[in-house]
Amino acid sequence: MISSYMSRRAFLKSVGLAAAAIMVPAKLRADDTKKPNIVIIYADDLGYGDVGCYGATKVKTPNIDRLATEGLRFTNAHSPSATCTPSRYAMLTGEYAWRKKGTGVARGDARMIIQPGRTTLPLVMQRAGYTTGVVGKWHLGLGERGSELNWNVDIKPGPLDIGFEYCFLIPATGDRVPCVYVENRRVVGLDPKDPIRVSFDGPIGDEPTGKDHPELLKMHPSHGHNQTIINGISRIGYMSGGKAARWVDEDMADVITGKAKDFIEKHKDERFFLYFSTHDIHVPRVPHPRFAGKSGLGPRGDAIVQFDWCVGEILEALDRLNLADNTLLIFTSDNGPVVDDGYKDQAVEMLDGHKPSGPLRGGKYSAFDAGTRVPFIVRWPGQVKPGRSDALVCQIDFTSSLAALTGEKLTPDDAPDSFNILSALLGKSLAGRDHLVEHANVLSLIKGDFKYIEPGKGPKISKNTNIELGIDPQPQLYNLRDDIGEKHNIASEHPEIVEELAALLSRIRNDGRTRPYE
């Protein structure tokens, strides 16, 4: 119970959000250490149990395991949401995505979700003197709201308008059109005589679809994903034109990892910030032939092996350029795992005892902890002592924490839900966040050992993915210290704790912010 580590009076006092001001006992000043380069490696759909250093035995991840050996491995670290677009929004803005309409999983033709003019993580880094870049999956929309998105001219606004100085993007996801790369403001390799057209409202052009021509597919959909065929794989949405610019899925990891390494190489003599957002292990899982069959777990396992290679390539580049000791590297994932997410790739049939969520319940899309509790490792040789941390941390805190590291000041309106937990991230403190709101179809609140899931309506299990969604018409309460798998709902045994956490969640929702005014 909460009374096991604090008095009831102390807990009730902590319900006031002003108590968040004591989030970390001791904060580091920017002048306490030299500003490092900063690299964030952001996996896609990588589960808590998908890598060796978090307990996986069926699939080998030597490069990620090396990071864990050389860095600080967190056991209670979270993405801001159980799905990709809202996690990325919250990480880059420091604002819970559920506060903002239009931050759900974005269509391939979504307009720019993060509006120019607001403070963002890359903008803070830019102000601190960093050269900033993003490479890989974007999935936060491109182009002006209220206007047609034309893929054949300069595309703006985009990442260059919110603090990044360079970008090489997968515009949305691999399973959504358009299946092209965007570098800075232009589609890469586009032939102007073959203009791109994209629609999510109905068929365009005469491109074959997976629904009408399954004989053309090298990978078949299990649900949805049956529209325009690109590279033998049918996608979500319709696309015509741009044939010379279309990506080859098997080459995607090589292409984006190469671009990330190029960015590091180009700016090795400057202070740089790189957000490397990989596509593995998101569907469609089509790893390069050199990784096919390597895991023994089918394409999903092979994609994990491929992703581990991507991590290794970044580590090699930092070592080769003598940058490792002056680089703060953060490794994590945008949300928890999903096995069948739209394609017949034998991911379920070939699990062979592998548990993508490890000891956790749920997965991607779920209010249970496997939705947001993700692998999270921080490495900074000589500054971060290797080991393990059980501190409660979240990616939404990157803006405030890295601002503190680099000596940048945030205004009261900046990053409204981002806390300075720098001491925890660097292993200087055992304390992290005081509380955290998890976001799925319903909201949850973690405080201390306890997790409260608010009542909700809807299916308990996803029809398509077979994932427990954590939705129940009754409130749920779990003691995560004793029941990390959230098997025992103790709400009826502790109505006073349910009442207190529900009140705190309501206040967080209504106040519009949680970061204390400084």
Image: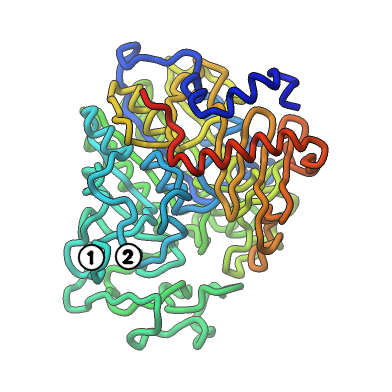
Callout 1 environment at 10 Å: few (<14), some (14 to 19), or many (20+)? some
**Residue 321 vs residue 424, the one in the foreground:** 424
Give the image location of residue 85, x and y in percent. 44, 54
Specify whether 5 is left or right of 446. Answer: right
The span from disc 2 to disc 1 (Cα, nearest Å) is 9 Å
Give the image location of residue 218, x and y in percent. 52, 75
Residue 334 appears in view: yes
Give the image location of residue 447, x and y in percent. 62, 31
Specify whether 38 is left or right of 47. Answer: left
Return the residue found at the far right.
493
SS class, disc 2: loop
Image: 251 above or below 427: below
Q: Which corner quadrant of the image does residue 173 belong to?
A: bottom left
Specify whether 267 is left or right of 100. Answer: left
Determine which residue is flagged by label 1: 189
Determine which residue is flagged by label 2: 180
For the point 51% across and 36% down, the residue is 63
**Residue 202 vs residue 193, the one in the foreground:** 202
Type of amino acid at the residue the image marks with label 2: Val
Residue 304 appears in view: no
Question: Which corner quadrant holds the C terminus?
Answer: top left
For the point 46% across and 58% down, the residue is 104
Whichever of callouts 2 and 1 sits on the residue coming sooner in the sequence is: 2
SS class, disc 1: loop
